[in-house]
Image: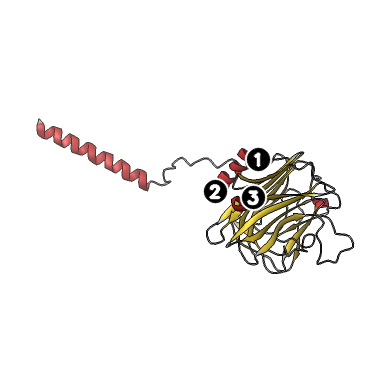
Amino acid sequence: MRKQVYILVAALLLFTLSSCFQDLGQNPPFDFPEEPPKPPISEDGQVFHMSFDTDYKDAVSGKSATMVGTPTLSEGKINKAYAGAQNSYLTFRLADMNAQLGSDLTVGFWYKVNAVPDRAGLIVIGPVTEGASPDAQNNRTAGFRIFREKAGGKQRIKANVGNGTADGWLDGVEKADLDPATAGWKYITLTLTKGKAVLYINAEEVATNNLSQISWSGCDIMSIGSGAPRFNEWGHLSDNSLIDDLRIYNKALTAAEIKNIVIHDTE
């Protein structure tokens, strides 16, 4: 009797192993359930999105930026990224955006800093400085300027916003410093509402300013990768850094919404 039980158990084991190996080698192979794809980043209020995956085209309007110099595409945070070069940048006509920019705004992008040169413009929208030479443009009464400057051995991200008659600064001092040797990719965000401007790095607030309201008077182009041609008097010229997935919204995203973008693009 015991011998028969052993034979039965052995037979069951052989059958189980055979079934397992058949599952592993079956044709067609066994389809294990896949993880559902990540939900896309919300496009609510989005008026501009340049991914830099294959070109310099805004996915919202379908219009392309004008290239100055020899920027290229390189490995980015998400697929490809804008790679700056000396005397190189992009400009995009505001008239080509699908909607006019208003008093509420968010500008967000991934950024991998290159400390050469030691100061540069990142994203700039500003008016012409009437009566000044092309290399002395610095009218800060309208639009905004996101830029970086040397701070010891680091690079400090700053912003400046014009309200129509004057300008306000967002300088987070050490909180806004990036170490070029270790920073890697950081998500830079500027949000504007009536009464407040906030600068974030990786969804963490680094600077604020009680801005009355942004003015767009005289603003007709956006520069990507340089302060030129509208913010160049102080040497905030082309940036050799990487810029990826530039988004602009006609609303001020909350810190939580910005954090969701950071998490989405990092996971």
Whichever of labels 1 and 3 marks the residue nearer the N terminus, that label is: 1
Count residues near mark 2 (Cα–Cα under 10 Å), then give few for <14, some for 14-19, many for 20+: few
Q: Earlier in the sequence, mark 3 or mark 2?
A: 3
Residue at (83% x, 66% y) in the render = 134
Q: Nearer the viewer, mark 1 or mark 3?
A: 3
Foreground of the two, 123 or 160? 160
Q: Position of residue 266 (x, y in %)?
A: 54, 48
- Mark 1 vs mark 3, CA separation in Å: 28 Å
The circle drawn on residue 172 is 3
- Vertical placement of residue 34 versus 182, above or below: above
Q: Residue at x 86, y 49 (%)?
A: 217
Amino acid type for the residue under numbered disc 3: Gly
In the rendered image, which residue does mark 1 sit on? Answer: 42
Q: Is residue 69 left or right of residue 24?
A: right
**Element type at marker 3?**
loop
**Mark 1 belongs to which amino acid?**
Ser
Q: Considering only vertical position in the picture, is 156 above or below 264?
A: below
Label pair 1/3, CB-CB below 8 angstroms: no
Q: Could you give the CA–CA distance between mark 1 and mark 2, rounded to whole angstroms?
A: 16 Å
Mark in front: 1 vs 2: 2
Quick one: label 1 or label 2, which is nearer the N terminus? 1
